[in-house]
Image (tube, rainbow, N blue to C red):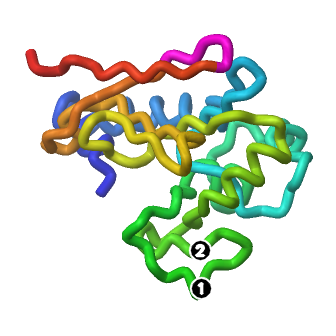
């Protein structure tokens, strides 16, 4: 499940690999939980929060502890920003949807969020788009939820798969998706 840990051990040996993995995680603990680009584009690992925070989102994000070693227990907001996913067409459990969010049974944690939840969040926080990662995309990226959500996956051939890699260029409130050539 956690491929990066195993990859560190394979590349650097058991002891040094463990140390490398621990140090990289210490860096991750201190990284920003999200970023705001051009004052209109939210970049986040997972997705939008289900928490009822209305217009206080950026204030609450600024209060997330740093370093954040245990997001699940230290900050429910951070946990959801890391783990929440968009609701896809294959999820048809809409009778259990609550406030445009539904428990993410696929991951066993976090929530799926609907297009309406995303639109409400964007409007409440004066945002235009959310750019996220967190889910492998065959073409390296996926445009979702009426073009307001972009999933960008920058690791090609993830876990031995055949997926492409992509990146996004954000400039003047415009997004340009760039597929990376990983054939060589």
Local packing at callout 1 (Cα closer than 10 Å; few below 14, some 14-19, many 20+) is few
Distance, label 2 to label 1, CA atoms, is 7 Å
Q: Residue at x 20, y 44 (%)?
A: 159
Asked whether the residues under the numbered discs 2 and 1 touch, taking CB atoms below 8 Å apart as contact, a structural biologist would say yes
In the image, is residue 59 above or below residue 81? above
Can you tell which quarter of the image residue 120 is in? bottom right
Give the magenta range. 169-173
- Image coords of residue 164 (percent x, y): 23, 32
Res. 16 visible in picture: no
Does the magenta segment cover residue 107? no
Q: Nearer the viewer, residue 99 or 146?
A: 146
Query: Residue farthest to the left?
Result: 184
Q: Crowding at label 2, few (<14), some or many (≥20) Cα neighbours within 10 Å?
A: many
The secondary structure that most of the magenta stretch takes on is strand
Residue visible at 54% across and 41% down?
A: 147
Question: Which part of the image, by quadrant, shows the C terminus?
Answer: top left
Identify which residue, 107 or 53, lies in the foreground: 53
Q: Residue furthest bottom?
A: 95
Kindly identify which residue carries mark 2. 102
Quadrant holding the N terminus: bottom left
- Helix, strand or loop at disc 2? strand
Q: Between 179 and 4, which is closer to the camera in this rendering?
A: 179
Q: Is residue 135 visible?
A: yes
**Residue under label 1:** 96
Q: Indicate the position of residue 12 as horizontal and vertical percent values.
A: 22, 28
174 sits to left or right of 119 = left
Left or right placement of residue 90 versus residue 31 in this view = left
Q: Residue furthest front?
A: 146
Mark closer to the chain start, 2 or 1: 1
Q: Residue at x 67, y 29 (%)?
A: 41
């Amino acid at each position: 499940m956690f491929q990066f840990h195993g990859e560190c051990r394979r590349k650097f040996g058991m002891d040094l690999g463990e140390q490398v993995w621990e140090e990289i995680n210490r860096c991750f603990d201190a990284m920003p939980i999200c970023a705001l680009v051009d004052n209109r584009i939210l970049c986040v690992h997972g997705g939008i929060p289900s928490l009822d925070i209305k217009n206080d989102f950026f204030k609450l994000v600024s209060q997330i502890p740093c370093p954040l070693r245990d997001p699940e227990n230290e900050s429910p907001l951070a946990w959801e920003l890391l783990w929440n996913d968009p609701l896809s067409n294959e999820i048809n459990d809409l009778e259990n949807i609550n406030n445009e969010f539904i428990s993410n049974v696929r991951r066993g944690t976090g929530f799926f969020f609907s297009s309406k939840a995303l639109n409400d969040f964007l409007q409440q926080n004066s945002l235009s788009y959310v750019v996220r990662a967190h889910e492998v995309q065959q073409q390296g990226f996926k445009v979702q939820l009426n073009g307001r959500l972009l999933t960008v996956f920058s690791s090609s051939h993830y876990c031995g798969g055949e997926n492409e890699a992509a990146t996004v260029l954000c400039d003047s409130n415009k997004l340009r998706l760039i597929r990376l050539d990983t054939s060589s």
